[in-house]
Image (tube, rainbow, N blue to C red):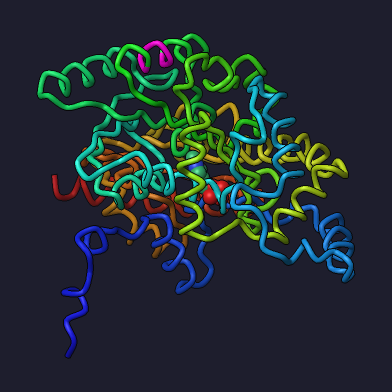
Amino acid sequence: MIDYDSFLSRAGRKMQQSEIRKMGTVLAEARDVVSFAPGYPDPALFPWADLRAITADLLSGDRGDALQYGPTRGDRALREVITGILAKRGVEASPDDLLVTTGSQQGLDLVARILLDPDDVVLVELPSYTGAITAFRNVQAELVGVRQEADGIDLDDLDAVTARLRAAGRRVRALYVVPNFQNPTGLLIGRDKRVRLLEWAARHDALILEDDPYCELYFEDGAGPGDIRPIKADDRDGRVIYLSSFSKTLAPGFRVAWLTAPAPLAARVEVAKQAADLCTGALDQHIVYEACRRGVLERQAPRLRRHYQHKRDVMERALKETLGDVVSWPAPRGGFFLWVALPAQVDADAMLKRALAHGVIYVAGSAFFVDGRGKNVLRLSFSAPSPERIVDGVSRLAGAVREEIAAAQAVG
Ligand SMILES: Cc1ncc(COP(=O)(O)O)c(C=O)c1O
């Protein structure tokens, strides 16, 4: 028997599977399960007809570049379109400071590679997006958590954590945040706080990694343009690396996303990307470019907002009706997620088995915490299941929660 573990690098040994991907495996193996686990967009909303027409044109045979290698930074025309998207968000960027990445996940991975040595400190919110946690852990960074409050990251705790680390001789390299409809909580970072985060970064000579895939998915009764203005929009000093994606607005299967960073950092990311994949898929980039040029993306946005807002309403109503006396959640004003606090005696990890037996899955809150907390909370995605399945799934979840409470009472 070959001991393959002995071949692994230290980093390779430490890599951990994403909890959310793991749930995907559970789902694949189980029948009739309502999945509230992964934050998948609803495929019914993919603009199928437009994409068929675009793809047929691109594959007509006279567009060699549609299937050719391209520049590592990404197709020039697409980068120009992206600068237009950014300008609407208030972010000024040049196509030269912008890289098209294979999903934002690759952006996070590459940024981690160029910025972080083993044991370097990155601050993340409690809770924070698991994909970012994984990318930072893969380069063996030390992740330190900062508490949240109703309007996002708690700035007092941020100062306290930074001061504590400094006193211990540790430099904070970067703070990672998802300011708009955060994954997993759905929270928005308050307007004023965004500016104060920039001040914090200047004061401590740190960078901000701003991950913003959900900003277009605000709900009518929720957030206005002023509420979702990226931190990057006011970044005069060049402290922010900003990432965003077409995954939630067009389709995640294209794996087309981007990051914009101060020029010297963008240049380093480009070098790192050369080793990772030479360039993002050419056909994907061309399809996305055409979808932007032909107005498909622009037409999509209001549809998506209405659709996901409706699903949020359906899920909130179902939860109130079935579990309103025992659970609570912050009302999301956009995005894909409900962050549900359970009674103290219910452990979301332990309850998963029971939930699966009832035919429903979610992601247990602990997956999003770097400090071992999050036992009594879970994330529900309302984005992919149909409204009928949402109602059915919440009723199944309610069955599991009630049983879990009864079981805890019997033991107690
Ligand atoms: C906060 C956040 N960042 C990044 C990603 C990854 O997106 P992409 O599909 O562009 O890799 C996701 C996907 O769920 C996300 O929620």
Q: Residue at x 55, y 14 (%)?
A: 234
The residue furthest bottom is: 1
Instruction: Tell me the residue at 49%/51% (across/down).
Output: 106
Q: Is residue 403 above or below residue 161?
A: below
Residue 153 rendering spot, x and y as whole percentages: 38, 21
Residue located 48% across and 9% down the image: 192
- 389 or 84, nearer to the observer: 84
Q: Position of residue 123 (x, y in %)?
A: 30, 30
Residue 409: image quadrant is top left
Tell me, yes or no, whether the highlighted magenta stretch contains residue 299. Answer: no
x 24%, y 58%: residue: 11
Q: Quadrant of the C terminus?
A: top left
In this image, 257 relative to 150: left or right? right
Span colored in magenta = 197-201
Q: Is residue 390 above or below residue 229?
A: below
Q: Main secondary structure of the magenta part?
A: helix
